[in-house]
Image (cartoon, rainbow, N blue to C red):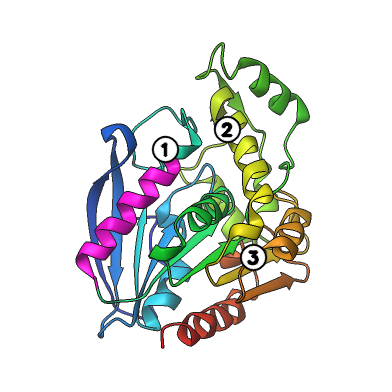
Amino acid sequence: MTKNSLEDEKAVTMDNQQFTVRGAGGVELFAQRWRPDRAPRGVVVLVHGFGEHSDRYGYLVTALTAAGYLVYSFDHRGHGRSPGQRGHVHRFDDFLEDVRQMIARARADEPSLPLFLFGHSVGGLVALDYAIRHPEELQGVVASAPLLSQPNISPLVLTIARLLSRLAPTFPLDTGLDPTTIARDPAEVQRYTTDPLVHAKTSARAAAEAMDAVAWVQAHAGELRTPLLLYHGGADRLAPIAGSRTFFVNAGSADKTFWELPDGFHEAHNDLDREQLFARLVAWLDARTQ
């Protein structure tokens, strides 16, 4: 385990294995798996958000493994310990292919266990996009504060991204993300701001592709058939909750649940009241592993 991973978590002993997954275009992505100390009851493939990495989910991983779930995750290209220009992706579909390869690895390891896809923020957008296209692979999809509307970053950044996406796709842009908006817990804000693997960088192409993906996912919400859990902080100033409300109303899943978390900030898994959230999340997963 790494310094930034589970150093504050002591509730459960688990096995952590690190490896690589070959994503779109043959890129070798840093990946890891956490195994509970008893026979697992299910698998959760975790897709992290913009500018961060898979080691920032220690509280969540601890809660899931304590409940008997195997957790697989990876660092997006251009993020964490994976290679690539920070924050850049040439096509949003590359994210989907990377997830497909991570799921394939988890399936190869655990072919008989139910598998859930969990995504946060931009990772939530990726997870929903994937679930719409590949419902047969998943027991359920969980979207935490997904990016489903224009993010709260400078409109100028988005305008420049649109203009330069084709002319200079790798042109770097600083999103100006405000770290104090991620959680109400000052210790988590401090951990975020001092993490050397965290960044606020994107590229012209990545920003434009993300906005196109938002429009596609919203337009195709009615095609979602996978059981859905969507939750979002009511005071989220990074990814507005309005996008989640719209998506949930239109989502085609017969089994769908939406939790609005009063006063919650963007990262519910690192925010105050996270333990109550984890208990509800585990109960939702348990009900769908039968």
240 on left or right of 32: right
Q: Main secondary structure of the magenta part?
A: helix
* Helix, strand or loop under label 1: helix
Gap in angstroms between the C-alphas marked 2 and 1: 11 Å
How far from the left and from the top, in percent, is residue 4? 40, 55
Label at residue 70:
none
Which comes sooner in the sequence, label 3 or label 1?
1
Taking depth in this image into account, of 84 and 272 the one nearest to the observer is: 84
Q: Quadrant of residue 268?
A: bottom right
Reading the chain from its start, which is encountered first: label 2 or label 1?
1
Q: Residues within 10 Å of mark 2 (few under 14, many from 20)?
A: some
Residue 114 against residue 118 in the figure, above or below: below
Question: What residue would you read off at disc 2?
Answer: 209
Image coordinates of residue 188 in percent, x first then y, are: 57, 59
The amino acid type of the residue labelled 2 equals Glu
Q: Give the number of callouts.
A: 3
* Distance of label 3 from label 1 (alpha carbons): 25 Å
> Circle 3 is placed at which residue position?
252
Q: Residue at the spot x=54%, y=72% of the render?
A: 227
Q: Which residue is mark 1?
A: 94
Q: Secondary structure at mark 2?
A: helix
- State the residue in front, 191 or 116: 116
Q: Nearer the viewer, mark 3 or mark 1?
A: 3
Please state which of the two labelled residues, at mark 2 or mark 3, is closer to the viewer: 3
Image: 100 above or below 256: above
The three-letter code of the residue at mark 3 reads Gly
Q: Which residues are magenta?
A: 94-111
**Image location (x, y in percent) of residue 135:** 46, 62
SS state under label 3: loop
